Amino acid sequence: MAGAAALTLGTACEERDRGAQEQASGQSTVNDQVAQAQQRTESAFDSARQAQEQASEQQKQASSAQQELQDKQREYQEAQAKAHSAAQQAQQAQQGAQQQKQEAQQAQRQQSETLAQQNQQARQQSEQLRQQSQQPVAVAPPPQTQPQGAQTQQQGAQAQQGSEQQVVGEVLSASDQELLLSSQGEPQLRLQVSPETQVMVDGRQANVGDIEEGSQVRASYRTDAQSGEPQAVRIEATSQVQPTAPAAPESGESTPGSQPTQ
């Protein structure tokens, strides 16, 4: 009996020890599982934190890229506006230059037409004087010696009448005191000139000394009552040198009557 009891007691002790060992082993397994779960949780937290940091960094990069894109768009718009303004200014400058060119061409045409008209008038006047110079010219008769009483009466009559005569001819010589005219190269009339004599050369007021030899002249004169010499009242002369024709236009300029190049 005692042996059986001891055997039973020993078996019970072994079972108790085995149960305690199993219980300790189970507790250790639970602790390991809890530790592993906690480690996984911390690892998940770390991964989430890293993902959040990466997302924040990516968001910053996206914001920076968007800001850079907006800056580029603003610069492009400013450059486009400047280019448009420069194009408008260039167009306005081109239009102004074209208008100035047309005005210059118009002024040149008007000047050419004016010169052509002046040349035509000068040729017509020269032709008229040439035709008139071929007509018989009135020649003043030489003074005749008369008795003192008759001469005094004649001088008084001439002074009262003071009639003017016309003469047309070609100038042989001219000075401040006299003008010698001829018809077809033959001396015809010597006109005395005084400060009261009106002198016109090519339509402009001048002096007798300005009249060149060979010029065509139309003169009005009176016979002086005392000396019997013809005294010039008015002299109109046309010089032989005609106004020069307008110079040929340079390259790029239009001639009279031509259309401006657009």
Image (cartoon, grey):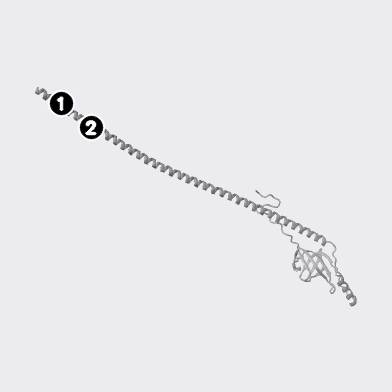
Q: Amino acid at mark 1?
A: Ala
Q: Are marks 2 and 1 in contact (CB under 8 Å)?
A: no
The crowd level at tag 2 (other Cα within 10 Å; few <14, some 14-19, many 20+) is few
Q: Quadrant of residue 206?
A: bottom right
Return the residue at label 2.
27
Residue 44 location in percent, x, y? 33, 36
Is 188 placed above or below 66 here? below
Identify the residue shown where x is 25% and y is 32%.
Answer: 30
In front: 51, or 130?
51
Residue 251: tell me if it is visible. no
Residue 7 is left or right of residue 46, and the answer is left
Residue 182 is left or right of residue 24, and the answer is right
Along the polypeptide, which appears first: circle 2 or circle 1?
1
Is 85 placed above or below 148 here? above
Identify the residue shown where x is 19% and y is 28%.
Answer: 19
Q: Secondary structure at mark 2?
A: helix
Residue 194 location in percent, x, y? 78, 71
Q: Quadrant of residue 136?
A: bottom right
The disc at residue 12 is: 1
Q: Nearer the viewer, mark 2 or mark 1?
A: 1
Q: Secondary structure at mark 1?
A: helix
The crowd level at tag 1 (other Cα within 10 Å; few <14, some 14-19, many 20+) is few
Residue 132 location in percent, x, y? 82, 61
Identify the residue shown where x is 43% and y is 43%.
Answer: 63
Residue 245 location in percent, x, y? 71, 57
Residue 100 is left or right of residue 15, and the answer is right
